[in-house]
Image: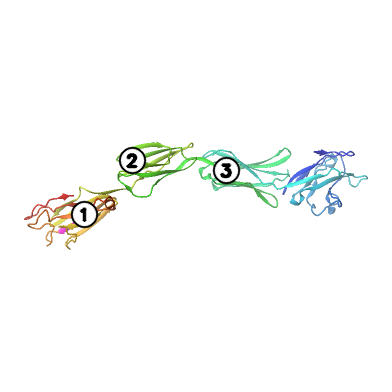
């Protein structure tokens, strides 16, 4: 509220709000005058706040910090205090017009109270930020010095290096505001990162609250996780589909590729079981949310199954060398054991070579025709005199099926009985 005196007319406010670290104006308007002085209102002393003609008389607390704006001839007696300090809070001042004249126009009955507050910047961000679209954020600080606003600085994540900023000042209902606006493309990497701004005054810095960014984005990484434990052929497995997105997916499309056929299941559940799993089975997941769609890689299931003898297993005679090959497919890989006439201890004349590829193990045994110990001897009984390979893996043990065994007899030679091949 403005006040008026009965002699000269002087217009001053009753209170003025100042921001610490800024400057403050105490508006004062009167008639044309030659000189003006300002004093601190005090019951006993009258400390000088401003005296342009006698600056040495100014109290040390205000020396070098006060000035009068405008022209005296125009009646402007406005006081400005720079670098407002916390100690200036509740400072009461009044003006003297023409203090050298008789009588001087004193207005101690029209004091002005200065309220000092420390201002922190206020940050505001648009409500919805979508990956790939432009966003805007404002950092605003209240100040009381129209000539020198504080500097504003954005503290952002490195993903905002493509953003630009602009600044402007405005007077809102007698209060000055300085705003710095940040604009740039939103990216999903910004999600949950912190953003805040700071205002630097002459002797200190204040900060706004930190805001965690909420970026909406479609699934960028979709991964499948299998439950722990072995997957047995004919059994089941539970698979979980996880998507890096915001918001979380509302629909999951499950794809199963098995025995050359593709099956598709649409669900709202991120975790589901798959039954009757066979070997060579692959699973994939597609996740959908309101922003976009993402697809996982195909995951090949590591299905365990019992050994199966392959048709490549056989014996043949090349020149004077007898060679037998045993191949078995299994997961995990099978182990091959050789026996001659049921004896697992092989004569020294035999040589064994083994090789493993993915899920297939191969064993090869050979013996020179002239060796004294032969798998098939003249006059031997082909039902007893046999070379065999035995294969096993952990799956067989777990399923309690026993060892799988194949008997492959050697080819017929002169004066020997024709051996028979038997698989059991």
Residue, far front: 400
C-alpha span from label 3 to label 2: 45 Å
Considering the image in quadrants, where does the N terminus appear? top right
Mark 1: which secondary structure? Answer: strand
Quickly name the residue at label 3.
163
Q: Residue at x 72, y 37 (%)?
A: 173
Q: Residue at x 51, y 45 (%)?
A: 189
Which mark is first along the chain, 2 or 3? 3
Q: Position of residue 228 (x, y in %)?
A: 38, 49
Q: Seen in the image, is 274 located left or right of residue 4?
A: left
Determine whether label 2 and label 1 are within 8 Å by CB.
no
Q: Which residues are magenta?
A: 363-367
**Residue 321 against residue 99 in the figure, above or below:** below
Q: Position of residue 43 (x, y in %)?
A: 86, 50
Quickly name the residue at label 1.
390
The nearer-to-camera label among 3 and 1 is: 1
Which mark is first along the chain, 1 or 2? 2
Other-residue count near label 2 (Cα within 10 Å), few / some / many at <14 / 14–19 / ≥20: some
Other-residue count near label 1 (Cα within 10 Å), few / some / many at <14 / 14–19 / ≥20: some
Q: How is the image coloured?
A: rainbow
Q: Position of residue 59 (x, y in %)?
A: 82, 53
Residue, far right: 102
Mark 2: which secondary structure? Answer: strand
Q: Main secondary structure of the magenta part?
A: strand
Q: Please tell me whether residue 366 belongs to the stretch shown in magenta.
A: yes
Quickly name the residue at label 2.
257
Q: Position of residue 414 (x, y in %)?
A: 7, 55
Which mark is first along the chain, 1 or 3? 3
Q: Nearer the viewer, residue 34 or 211?
A: 211
Specify the label residue 270 is tagged with. none
C-alpha span from label 3 to label 1: 70 Å
């Amino acid at each position: 509220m403005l006040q008026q005196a009965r002699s000269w007319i002087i217009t001053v406010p009753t209170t003025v709000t100042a921001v610490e670290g800024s400057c403050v104006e105490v508006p004062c308007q009167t008639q044309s005058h030659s000189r003006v002085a300002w004093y601190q209102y005090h019951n006993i002393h009258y400390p000088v706040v401003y005296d342009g003609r006698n600056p040495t008389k100014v109290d040390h607390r205000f020396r070098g910090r006060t000035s009068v704006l405008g022209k005296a001839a125009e009646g402007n007696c406005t006081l400005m205090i720079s670098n407002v300090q916390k100690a200036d809070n509740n400072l009461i001042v009044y003006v003297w017009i023409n203090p050298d004249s008789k009588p001087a126009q004193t207005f101690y009955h029209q004091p002005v109270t200065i309220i000092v507050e420390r201002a922190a910047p206020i940050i505001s961000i648009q409500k919805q930020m979508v990956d790939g679209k432009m966003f805007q954020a404002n950092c605003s600080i209240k100040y009381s010095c129209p000539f020198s606003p504080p500097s504003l600085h954005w503290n952002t994540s490195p993903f905002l290096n493509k953003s630009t900023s602009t600044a402007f000042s405005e007077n809102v209902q007698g209060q000055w505001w300085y705003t710095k606006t940040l604009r740039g493309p939103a990216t999903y990497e910004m999600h949950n990162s912190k953003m805040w701004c700071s205002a630097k005054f002459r002797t200190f810095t204040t900060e706004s609250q930190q805001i965690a960014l909420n970026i909406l984005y479609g699934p960028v990484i979709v991964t499948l996780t299998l439950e722990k434990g072995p997957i047995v052929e004919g059994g089941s497995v539970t698979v979980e589909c996880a998507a890096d997105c915001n918001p979380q997916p509302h629909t999951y499309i499950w794809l199963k590729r098995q025995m050359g056929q593709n099956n598709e299941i649409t669900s709202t559940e991120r975790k589901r079981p798959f039954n009757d799993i066979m070997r060579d089975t692959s699973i994939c997941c597609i996740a959908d949310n309101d922003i976009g769609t993402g697809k996982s890689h195909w995951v090949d299931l590591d299905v365990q199954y019992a050994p199966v003898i392959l048709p490549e297993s056989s014996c043949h005679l090349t020149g004077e060398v007898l060679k037998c090959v045993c191949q078995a497919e299994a997961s995990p890989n099978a182990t091959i054991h050789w026996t001659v006439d049921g004896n697992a201890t092989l004569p020294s004349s035999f040589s064994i070579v083994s090789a493993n590829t993915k899920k297939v193990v191969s064993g090869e045994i050979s013996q020179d025709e002239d060796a004294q110990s032969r798998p098939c001897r003249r006059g031997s009984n082909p039902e007893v005199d046999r070379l065999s390979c035995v294969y096993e893996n952990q799956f067989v043990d777990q399923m309690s099926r026993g060892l799988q065994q194949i008997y492959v007899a050697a080819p017929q030679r002169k004066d020997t009985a024709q051996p028979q091949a038997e698989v059991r």
